[in-house]
Amino acid sequence: MRINSCTHCGDSFESKRPDALFCSIRCRVRNSRKAKPSYLPKESPEKDYTAENIQVRKDLEFDFELIELWAKEYSRPVEWVRRSVESYRLAGAPLEHFQQRYLKKDKSIPTIPEVLEISRQIQIDTP
């Protein structure tokens, strides 16, 4: 193991790879995006927060149910489906693409490079 320093947050982290740049995939995705993610609350110019500032994302609430449903329906490992859904969420890609491309095995649908990179990084980060 080698001790590296994250290029975005500066935290030290252990990595098997000497060329690792980020302490986690979450750090990489959060800090490398130019636009603010849609799941963060919208800031009002007056900094006056009311009930209107609260956004509920129903799709994020039920990922665990969807993961188990897909794992059972398509006879796939739950952990693999969980990592894949996490990759798609972090990349901001639609889950329908994952279902069509990987679960229904429709190879005519092109891959999304950002999702593949995030998925690789999650596999490296997962013990």
Image: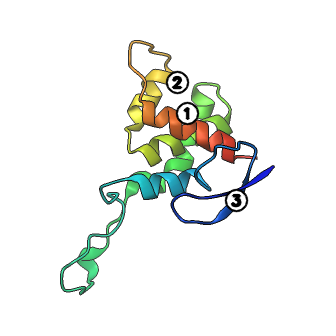
Q: Which residue is mark 1?
A: 70
**Residue drawn where x is 44% and y is 30% of the image:** 113
**Residue drawn where x is 50% and y is 16% of the image:** 105
The mark nearer the N terminus, 1 or 3, is 3
Q: Which residue is mark 3?
A: 13
Tell me which amino acid carries mark 3.
Phe
Q: CA distance from mark 2 to mark 1?
A: 8 Å
Q: Position of residue 10 (x, y in %)?
A: 58, 66
Q: CA distance from mark 1 to mark 3?
A: 34 Å
Left or right: where 57 falls relative to 127 = left
Q: Position of residue 63 (x, y in %)?
A: 51, 48
Give the number of the mark in front: 1 or 3.
3
Q: CA distance from mark 3 to mark 2?
A: 34 Å
User: Could you say which disc has been placed on residue 116 in the image?
Assistant: none
The mark nearer the N terminus, 3 or 2, is 3
Tell me, yes or no, whether the two marked residues, 2 and 1, touch with CB atoms within 8 Å.
yes
Left or right: where 73 falls relative to 51 = right
Tell me which amino acid carries mark 1.
Trp
> Element at badge 3?
strand
